[in-house]
Image (cartoon, grey):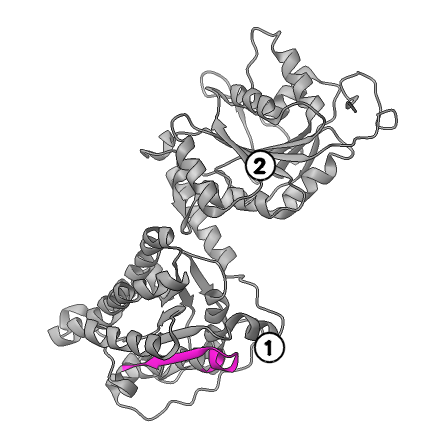
Amino acid sequence: MTQDQTTDPGTTSEDRTPWRPSRTVAVVLAGGTGTRLGLGIPKQLLKIAGKPIIEHTLAVFEAAPEIDEIIVLMATGHVAEAQKIVDKAGFRKVTKVIEGGDTRNDTTRVALDAVGEGDCNILFHDAVRPLLSGRIVRECVNALWTYSAVDVAIPSADTIIQVDENECITDIPVRATLRRGQTPQAFRSGTIREAYRRAEGDPNFAATDDCGVVLRYLPETPIKVIDGSDENIKVTHPVDVHLADKLFQLAAAKVPRLTDHRAYSEEVSGRTIVVFGGSYGIGHDLTELARRYGAQVFPFSRSSTGTHVERPEDVEAALRTAFEATGRIDHVVVTAGILEKGALAEMDQDTIDRVLQVNFVGPVTVARQALPYLQQTKGQLLLYTSSSYTRGRADYALYSATKAALVNLTQALADEWAEFGVRVNVINPERTATPMRTKAFGAEPEHTLLAAETVAQSSLDVLISDLTGQVIDVRRPPGEAPVAVAVPAQTDRAASAAAVG
């Protein structure tokens, strides 16, 4: 067996036997119980962006070409749940899902036994760091060709102080030399095994991470530090859940576009798309775009087909029309919405009812009616919100409230429908040049508005992606040409319901 020689003091890199690992194993440590989050389930099973946290984490290693095998060490009593996630997601690299130990170090020992004998690379990673990048994995594995222990860390933006038992400062280390540790921590198998072998003889042994064990018991072994990332956060406290969800949202906004017309045609051709609100604005542009790539698109709206999204019979008739014509429905899109400005206290009841019915009851109705069709194709429901969902705006309180409700609806349905393989996402465009917006706000400087075509393109990219439970921000690209908007002649009611603004 080729053994790494870094356990011998005084050994230099030139003296070492060349490292030839048989494989690289990612050990995902999922032993947390979620106590600090106040949950009744382990935090790694909590869903963020439509999937359990541990599923996001495993997906990174599954996709990393440097990783040959994945072993999951799960919290006691939850192995079956983790195994179910692995099986459903089809992670082929996961070879074992087993219970971890009572402590972090006990869990490492269990992991080493699970890895077995033989020289290999081992990466230990917290399951609740779901935003790990492929770049970090690659650099950890590459560093093991030169070093036998590797850590991941980022510079500290804060001044670190050291205090005594009375909470008084005793030292302020120089910040330039400080780092905030992350995971994965990577090792040549012989090095980490030797460190733990030596630790077993220490009655006072206690460490919070594996690099700490190497540092203490193999002080002659250099531990290489590679750059982590600010996004590689650990979900520990309630605020971390919200931060992680927002970071996934930002990542989703970068859904890659395909390279050319042929690539889109290969993806989209033959799909059936139903668009509610497809006469004007974003819905119209999405309809035209998808048709150019070969999709069979069925646009419905109040003004063109007499379809009211809040009426179950209208929605069912529309879906049945598309299904009977093509035998399938792959995507259902709801861009229909109305924006009525005015103080809530001064708004008449008919207007209130109309806003609530079209903006919220409509998408709910479409979702209920569309699910049986989308189950057959493992398709997607796509909704639209507004930047006002994060903070209610005066003079259009109901619009803001309904758009916030659609975000919650998206996240909830993504969870509910995951078992059916149906994805649900919501687009969040910045101020967009649509007939609805023009009616509500009048003429605005063209360079300040996002083109409806841009939102339509992003919408198509989301439809052909595997995202679910995401709020996808769409922003005007720097340097985008001024938007030219041709507003069709229509009634005020039709303009309001034409598209999301």
Image coordinates of residue 194 in percent, x first then y, are: 69, 17
Q: Which residue is mark 1?
A: 261
Q: Residue furthest right?
A: 14
Q: Which image quarter is the C terminus in? A: bottom left
Which span is picked out in magenta? Answer: 288-301
Q: Residue at (37%, 83%) from the top-left corner?
A: 280
> Where residue 191 sits: x, y (%)?
70, 22
Can residue 340 be seen from the camera position used here? Answer: no
Identify the residue at horizontal 43%, vertical 28% (top origin). Answer: 75
Residue at 45%, 73% in the rendered image: 271
Q: Write down the quadrant of residue 123 in the picture.
A: top right
Is 154 situated left or right of 393 in this image?
Answer: right
The quarter holding residue 496 reads bottom left
Tag 1: amino acid: His
Which residue type carries mark 2? Ile
Residue hosting label 2 = 70
Give the total of numbered labels. 2
Numbered disc 1: secondary structure? helix
Front residue of 367 and 80: 80
> Which residue is drawn at the image coordinates 40% and 33% (left, top)?
80
**Residue closer to the observer: 333 or 324:** 324
Residue 449 in the image: state x and y as whole percent. 45, 77
- Residue 301 drawn at (x, y percent): 29, 81
Magenta stretch holds residue 187: no
Identify whether 448 is placed above or below 306. above
N-terminal label among 1 and 2 = 2
Separation of marks 1 and 2 at Cα, in angstroms: 38 Å
Quick check: 282 left or right of 268?
left
